[in-house]
Image (cartoon, helix red, strand yellow):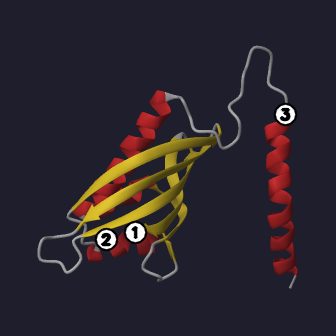
Amino acid sequence: MRIGLALVCVAFLMPVAIAQEAAKPAKAGETPAPLGSVSNDASLAEMFEAKVRAEWDALKNKDKKAYGELLADDYEGVEVDGRGERNRTQSINDLEDQYTFNYTLERLKVMPLGPDAALVIYEVTMQYPPKAQLHYSRVYISELWVKRAGQWKELHYQETKVK
């Protein structure tokens, strides 16, 4: 009961804390990007695009080592298959069941959430092997990335099917 009450309190207080952080005045000569704004920093967008492509290449190639290196230890992901949340170990082990033959990334956007966090959103069209019943699938993806020990790691992944 206490844990549930604590989670409710956190859920209501988190937006207040974020709003207070966003409302802090900028230092002299500094113009902060609004919270949730799309980054104009080309190097940041390029870095995350490379990480997302490395993630999808690892999925396509069933490369558990490369995929695992991108994920935070406390990673959780939700895919459109309806199986619920997967932790890091489950997601890595699920690579064996991946059938992505090829993929196309579109509309990648990076929204910095601070110096050590960013929300990356994009659409991906997955192409399956020629003999598969389903040939293509499109999903809208949101990924939360955090910087830990100087390394960007994916903390959360969420897919939504696109028609």
On the picture, is 90 further left or further right than 129?
right
Q: Residue at x 68, y 31 (%)?
A: 33
Q: Which mark is residue 24?
A: 3
Q: Quadrant of residue 58?
A: bottom left
On the picture, is 133 further left or further right than 32?
left
Amino acid carrying mark 1 in the image: Lys
Give the image location of residue 133, x and y in percent: 20, 81
Which of the two residues, 78 or 38, is positioned nearer the viewer here? 38
In this rendering, is residue 65 above or below 6? above
Give the image location of residue 118, x and y in percent: 58, 45
Please report whichever mark, 3 or 2, sits nearer to the chain's N-terminal start.
3
Give the image location of residue 96, x and y in percent: 27, 74
Evaluate whether residue 147 shows in this view: yes
Evaluate whether residue 63 shows in this view: no
Extreme residue in the left direction: 131
Q: Residue at x 57, y 44 (%)?
A: 147
Nearest to viewer (mark 3 / mark 1): 1
Q: Which mark is residue 126?
A: none
Q: Categorize mark 2 by other alpha carbons within 10 Å: few (<14), some (14-19), many (20+).
A: some
Give the CA distance from mark 3 to mark 1. Answer: 41 Å
Extreme residue in the bottom direction: 1
> Which quadrant would the C terminus be assigned to in this image?
bottom left
Question: For mark 2, what is the residue?
Answer: 95
Amino acid carrying mark 3 in the image: Lys
Q: Quadrant of residue 79?
A: bottom left
Give the CA distance from mark 3 to mark 2. Answer: 43 Å
Please report whichever mark, 3 or 1, sits nearer to the chain's N-terminal start.
3
Nearest to viewer (mark 3 / mark 2): 3
Do the residues under discs 3 and 1 have CB atoms within 8 angstroms?
no
In this rendering, is residue 29 above or below 20? above
Question: For mark 1, what is the residue?
Answer: 163
Amino acid carrying mark 2 in the image: Leu
